[in-house]
Amino acid sequence: MEWLTSIIYTLIGVAIGGGLGFYFTKKKFEKELKENPPINEKMIRAMFLQMGRKPSEAQIRQIMKSINQSR
């Protein structure tokens, strides 16, 4: 019966460790995304200029708003 107790403790430890690892990894990832967003207004302007268009400020705000809503 000692082996059964050992297996149960091991499974509990793995579950707790996995849960804590997932939680802290998620928090770190969200913090990194907030500090370093994948796209910003300067990048949107550059994309428009590469396409040969001059974006208005309203267009840039609209694109940023749609990107932030999709997160």
Image (cartoon, helix red, strand yellow):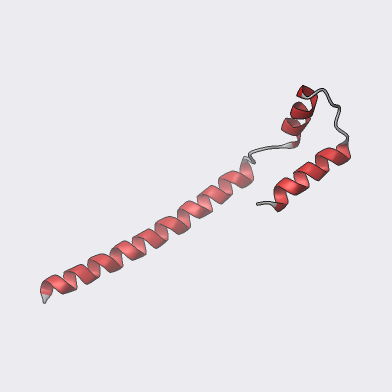
Residue 19 picture quarter: bottom left
Position of 19 with respect to 44 (left or right) is: left
Residue farthest to the bottom?
Answer: 1
The number of numbered discs placed on residues in the rendered structure image is 0
Quadrant hosting residue 5: bottom left
Residue at point 30%, 62% (across, down): 14
- In the depicted structure, whether residue 39 falls above or below residue 46: below
Front residue of this view, candidates 35 and 64: 64
In the image shown, does 31 or 11 lie closer to the viewer? 11
Name the image quarter holding residue 33.
top right
The N terminus: image quadrant: bottom left
x%, y% of residue 71?
65, 52
In the picture provided, is 7 more to the left or to the right than 25? left
Residue at image coords 37%, 59%: 18
Is residue 35 left or right of 52 when viewed as pictured?
left
* Whole-percent x, y for residue 20 in the image: 41, 60
Name the residue: 11% across, 74% down.
2
**Place of residue 56 in the rendered image (x, y in percent of width and height, measured from the top left):** 88, 34
Q: Position of residue 30 (x, y in %)?
A: 57, 50
Q: Is residue 19 above or below residue 59?
A: below
